[in-house]
Structure formats: structure tokens, C-alpha cells
Amino acid sequence: MVRKGLLLISVLVVSLLALAQNALVSTSADTKGVSLTIYSQNFGVVREKRDINLKQGLNTVLFQDVPISIDPTSVTIKSLTAPNALTMREQDFLYDALNSTSILDKSVGKTIKLRRTLPNGQVELVEGVLLNPPTAILSGLSPINQGMVVRLKDGSLLVNPVGEVVLDVVPEGLIARPTLMWQLDAGRGGSQTIEVGFIANNLSWRADYVAVVNQAETAVDLNGLVTLDNHSGATYRDTQLQLLAGDVRRVSQGVSPMPEYGVAMMRAGAPEAPQFQEQAFSDYHLYTLEGKTTLRDNETKQLNFMSAKNVKVNRKFVMDLGRRVFTMRGVPGEGGETQEGRANIIFELKNSKENNMGIPMPRGRVRAYKSDENGNLQLLGEDQIDHTPRDQTIRLYIGDAFDVMGERVHTNHNQISDRIYEDSYKITVTNRKTVPAAVMVVEHLSGDWQITESSQKYNKLDAYTVEFPTTVPANSKVVVSYTVRVKF
């Protein structure tokens, strides 16, 4: 029985790139410093310094260890040693990576050897021309090159041969790792410190917030974390990290070389000291990590960036059943002009220094927790906030109240004329809690409206929204009713 196996390729090669045998090679080992700015739009700006010993005149330079997701059109290069004495004449991005698949794909029509182990234990080499590379590679100790076709010297065909493929040379154009190849014109010879900048895709960050509510639900301890995702195809070691919050406009001209990934990972715990310094930058906000960090390829990393204690919170119920006017529940016997629902739980907190905050907060998800009688943190709910400047109020819709319910009934419609009509509504708010509940009953109006009758006072929030502040005693009901006249 033939055992299935991995495809093993032996490559005897003297040079990595025949077309650049005399090139200067620069690798990540030559790095003198890296800085990285990650944007929340799945890309980053990389700046790297390396020392390169150039000769005067034209130089071919292989700048290796760049991410496969690099945008080669974004590359900038300058000499910090001799700023006016270096010019890039030409650039090639070499990314056809050297691996078993690419080697065999580029070896079609060329002579290869198969190293096979015979049943008696002897090893033989079979030579032929590769007509078709494998379409699948199976596992085991003796490889089966599924789909491979080799024409032997006697003209016969070998299909799905068993054995290891041996090549004498690397097919032209293949490289071991993504590389930028430059033609640099140096005005003077000697070692120069080169700073290279470029955009790399598949780098992203997002903010996550944990808000632990006190027992009275009047204040929270807020902890902010940033989650970094690196799927760019490169590792950034000992890098100065910055995060830019804001929506930077970019013009899309195609799909990035690497797929996008997203990994969510949250943790709750005691707040740590903030590690980032925030500053305004143009019309955005920039967060700079204190010290340096390493962000590895295919890694998700979390860092603390803010912590605020005893942030005052305004907790309230909002009954906004008018939003559900066109959502028919379809319960048999229920009127089409009746809506039922529960009060929305809203937390409001001001992002100000007076409220122990006052830092621009990047867009992100906020999770609210509260300890139960046993001291266990329980999730109350979560919401998404947008980029929030300092001194702005944050409104979090974290869930719907179990014991505060409402029923909205369109009780009457009266057509006064072709352009005027009156509608009457009754909203019944029920509180089954053992304490009073302050509820804001919100209604949405249209046209040229005027409330002609109301059971209580109301506040006009905007041109087409009003709210009725209502306090419902424990285990009781309160009815809010009004009539509105509308002109068109």
C-alpha cells in the first residue's frame, strides 16, 4: 500500500535572483528604527530606517522583508545622510513567492527528477519533462503528486507519480520573500541612512470599552482598550506605535493583495494605567504609545489606552413606541393602530474633565457590567459609540426594561378639511418595579403640527419630536394622552 505524503522539493541553487546577482541586499536585520501608524480603516503607514552602503552612481538594491500587503505605489524613500544626493530611478515589487506550488507551476516544460523509494528499499531517480504540476498534495510519508504528468525519455507518460520532486535550479522570477528592487542613483558613495515609508493593508485597530456600573447606577468606572490586528504579512519589532482616530479619505483602485481578517477578543478586569498619549492632529486625533512594542504577523494584541473612575451617569427610561408604527405584530385580534413595547434603558455620561474624563474617545463598542449580590459581574448590555470629542455627551442604549412597559393607541382620527386633520393618542406606561420610574415618553410628529390638548406638559426636542416627562409610581400605571392638529 502506498502511503500518502507531503510534497518534498529539493532545490540546488546558487543565487536567489539571477537578474540581480550583483545587487545590494538589505534585510530587516539592517533596521535602525521602525515607526507604525495604524488607521481604523484597515491600513497603516510604515516608516523604516536602514543603513545601506551605496556606491556613487547607479545602484541595484533589494529591499527585503516588506509586507506582502504593501501598496508599492505609496513608497517614499529619502536619504537622511545626504537628502539631496539620492534619486530613485526605478522600482519593482517582487512578490511571486518561492514555495512548492509556484516552483512547480513555473517548471512546466522543464526537466525534473523524481526520487522514488522502491519496495526493496533502494532509491532511484527518474528523469522527465514536467507537463502538468500537481493539483493536490496528499499527506503521508511517500508523496503522491496528484494530477502531475511527467513525460519520460522513452516518450511514455507518468501520471500521479510517487516520490520527491528534485529540481536543479529555481525557476526565474521566484523570490523567498516580498522584495522592493530599486535602481538608486547616489550622488556620493558610502554608507547612508535611508528612510523608507509606505502604506500596508490589513492592519487595523478598534476601541473597546468596559464600563462597570455602581450599585445605585449613578456612576461607572470606565476602562478603554485598543485591539490591534496585524495580517499584513510582516512583523514590526520594537516599533513606535501610533493610532489615528478619524475617517481619512482614500480612493479605492482595486482589491488589496491579502484578504481582510477580523478577530474580536475582549477582556474585563481591573483598569490599568493608560499607555497612550493623545494629541490633536489636523482634523483627527493621534494616540501615541509610550515606549515601544512588537506587533507580529497574524497577531491580535490588546493595549490599555484610557481609564476613568467614578464617571457620573444619568440613567433614564425612554418610551418611544412611535418608531414601531409600521411594525405590525400580527397577533390575532390586535388593532392595527396599537403598538406595545418596553422602555429603552439609556445611560448618558458627559466626556468632560469635570466628569473625570475629557479625552477624545475613538469609535468603539461599550459594554456595561454590574456586580450582583454575590459580587459577580453581569453584562447589562452594550452599544456602539462614534468618535466622540471631549465635552460631548455619550448616550448608550444598553437594553430594554423588563418591568417598565408601554402601550400606544391611536384613539381617534378626524378629517377637518382637505388639508387639515386631527389625531388623538393614548400612551399607557406600566411600572411593575418596587420603586418609582422616571420615563420620557417620546412622540414623532409630521407636517405643520400643533398639540391642541395634552394630559401633561411636554418638551419640544426638534421640529418633529416631543417628549412627555413622566414619573410612574411603583407598581402603577400612568396615561399620557394628547391631540395634535396637522396642516399640509
Image: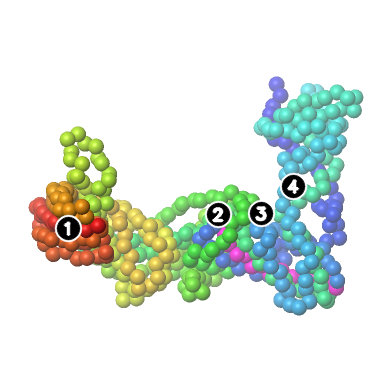
Sort mark 1 into few (<14), some (14-19) or many (20+) by Cα contacts within 10 Å: some
Tell me, yes or no, whether the two marked residues, 3 and 4, touch with CB atoms within 8 Å.
no
Of circles 4 and 2, the one toward us is: 4
Report x, y in % for residue 428: 13, 51
Q: Which residues are magenta?
A: 43-56
Q: Residue at 11%, 62% (x, y): give it.
A: 456
Judge whether residue 48 is colored magenta.
yes
- The answer to whether residue 423 is visible is no
Sequence-earlier tag: 3 or 2: 3
Q: Say which label, 3 or 1, has the lower sequence index.
A: 3
Q: Position of residue 18 (x, y in %)?
A: 85, 52
Residue nearest the observer in this picture, 425 or 276: 425
Identity, as a three-letter code, of the amino acid under mark 3: Ile
Q: Is residue 364 magenta?
A: no
Q: Residue at x 82, y 24 (%)?
A: 157
Q: Is residue 230 left or right of residue 223?
A: right
Residue bearing mark 2: 299
Residue 20 falls left or right of residue 382:
right
Closer to the eye: label 4 or 1? 1
Q: Residue type at mark 4?
A: Leu
Q: How many C-alpha atoms fall within 10 Å of the one at disc 3: few (<14), some, or many (≥20)?
A: many
Res 467 quadrant in image: bottom left
Which residue is disc 3 drawn over? 68
Tell me the colour scheme of the image. Answer: rainbow
CA distance separating discs 3 and 4 = 13 Å
The residue identified by callout 1 is 485
Farthest-out residue, right: 154
